[in-house]
Image (cartoon, rainbow, N blue to C red):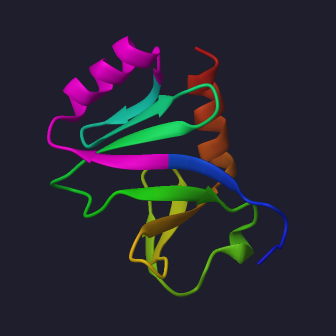
Amino acid sequence: MNKRLKTIDHVAIRSGNIDACKEWYEQEFNAVCVFSTDFYHRMRFGNIYLAIIDKNKYPYNHIGVLIDNYEDLPTDGERHEHRDGTIGVYKQDPCGNWVEYIWYSDEAKEMLEKHESR
């Protein structure tokens, strides 16, 4: 894996009502929802994304660390190919916290840029 300083892409929090949670972050912090599904809202802040995830679909809170090159994704851990074109590999740190190593395909980057320009 590349040894340069990594970037935190997002923090993911589980919620029993993702729509109410989304509205609260919009009102409280002027966060902007840039992508949504029935189980997921991606909120843009000035310096990071907040993923609001359905607690009945996703098993844990986590931080997402951006991986620039597909080849640098870990080969161990729980691998998930997400609907938005990203690939995440979930692993626990030594204290039991979950970390997602997340890589964006070109299509995922284009989709995010499209939503960002709104």
Residue 74, placed above or below residue 70:
below
Q: Is residue 30 above or below residue 85?
A: above
At 59% from the left edge and 45% from the top edge, which residue is drawn? Answer: 108
Q: Is residue 110 above or below residue 64?
A: above
Vertical side of 50 occupied by 90: above or below: below
Q: 108 or 73: nearer the eye?
A: 73
Please state, as top left, top right, bottom left or bottom right, where the N terminus lies in the image.
Answer: bottom right
Q: Name the outermost residue toward the bottom.
A: 76
- Residue drawn 37% across and 15% down? 28
Q: Position of residue 101 (x, y in %)?
A: 57, 66
Q: Was residue 81 drawn as part of the magenta stretch in this picture?
A: no
The residue lying at 49 percent from left, 77 percent from top is 93
Within the magenta stretch, is there residue 13? yes
Residue 22: x, y in percent?
31, 26
Which residue does the image show at 38% across and 76% down from the upper left? 96
Is 15 or 83 nearer to us in this picture?
Answer: 15
Which segment did they paint magenta? 11-32
Q: Position of residue 104 (x, y in %)?
A: 63, 54
**x and y percent of residue 61 in the render?**
34, 57
Quarter of the figure with residue 102: bottom right
